[in-house]
Image (spheres, rainbow, N blue to C red):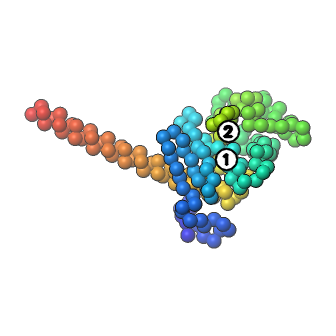
Amino acid sequence: MLPFYGGKVSGVYGFIKARNDNKIESMAKKLSIKIEGKEISLRQFNQEDYISLTDMANWDNDPNARSRIQSWLKNGSTIRFLELWEKYNNSDFNYMQMDVIKMRISENAYVLTAKRWIEETHAIGIQAKAGRYGGTYAHRDIAFEFASWLSPEFKCFLIREFQRLKSDEYSRQKLEWSYHRFLSKVNYRLHTDSIK
């Protein structure tokens, strides 16, 4: 049985995996989560965690993975979710262009890409970068919504590994803080003893 959101999850189809399959790797600037052998990149934008939608779309090696982000963006409930997220997190969001997108989203010829979404609405919840180390990244809230659209099983893996990453990060920061506190204490004693 695995701990999950304060309860226990057992017997979920394909959910129980060996701890070695899902590892968290952390480097100086690049963070990644491994889910069933696939690496999902994480980045920090404005001190917020963003997860690679590009890596997530390819988690099951489907040949149509490249079009998954566009298909997800074409979904009406996705557009409503993104609009609400931007409403609460982005004061520069372009609501007039959002109305145009809502009207055109049902047209078969209308293609909404992540870059187009960002440029037209001034969205901050999704970041798209071209090039070698590029890709489409989304704020963790939006990435979890994308994971739900991909697969409930994948979403469970992603949440569990992301929480483990944050727990490890918190433990490291706590240890670092204790270390700095100890050094300050020793330093204080050295200074006060030298004055005496």
Q: Which residue is farthest bottom?
A: 11
What quarter of the picture does the C terminus occupy?
top left
Residue under the point 79% across and 45% down: 67
Amino acid type of the residue tagged 1 in the rendering = Asp
Asked whether the residues under the numbered discs 2 and 1 touch, taking CB atoms below 8 Å apart as contact, a structural biologist would say yes
Question: Residue 126, relative to residue 24: is it above or below?
Answer: above
Q: Which residue is farthest right?
A: 108
Amino acid type of the residue tagged 2 in the rendering = Gly
Residue 118, image quadrant: top right
Could you tell whether 150 is left or right of 38 in the image? right
Q: Give the CA separation, mark 2 to mark 1.
A: 8 Å
Say whether disc 2 or disc 1 marks the residue closer to the N-terminus. Answer: 1
Badge 2: few (under 14), some or many (20 or more) residues near its Cα, within 10 Å? Answer: some
**Which residue, given by chain and number where applicable, does mark 1 sit on?**
55
Please tell me which residue lies in front, 150 or 18. Answer: 18
Which secondary structure lies at badge 1? helix
Q: Residue 9: x percent and y percent?
A: 59, 67
Q: Is residue 132 visible?
A: yes
Residue under the point 79% across and 49% down: 64
Which secondary structure lies at badge 2? strand
Could you tell whether 28 is left or right of 101 in the image? left
Q: Residue 1: x percent and y percent?
A: 55, 70
Residue under the point 61% across and 50% down: 39
Q: Is residue 77 visible?
A: no
Q: Which mark is residue 135?
A: 2
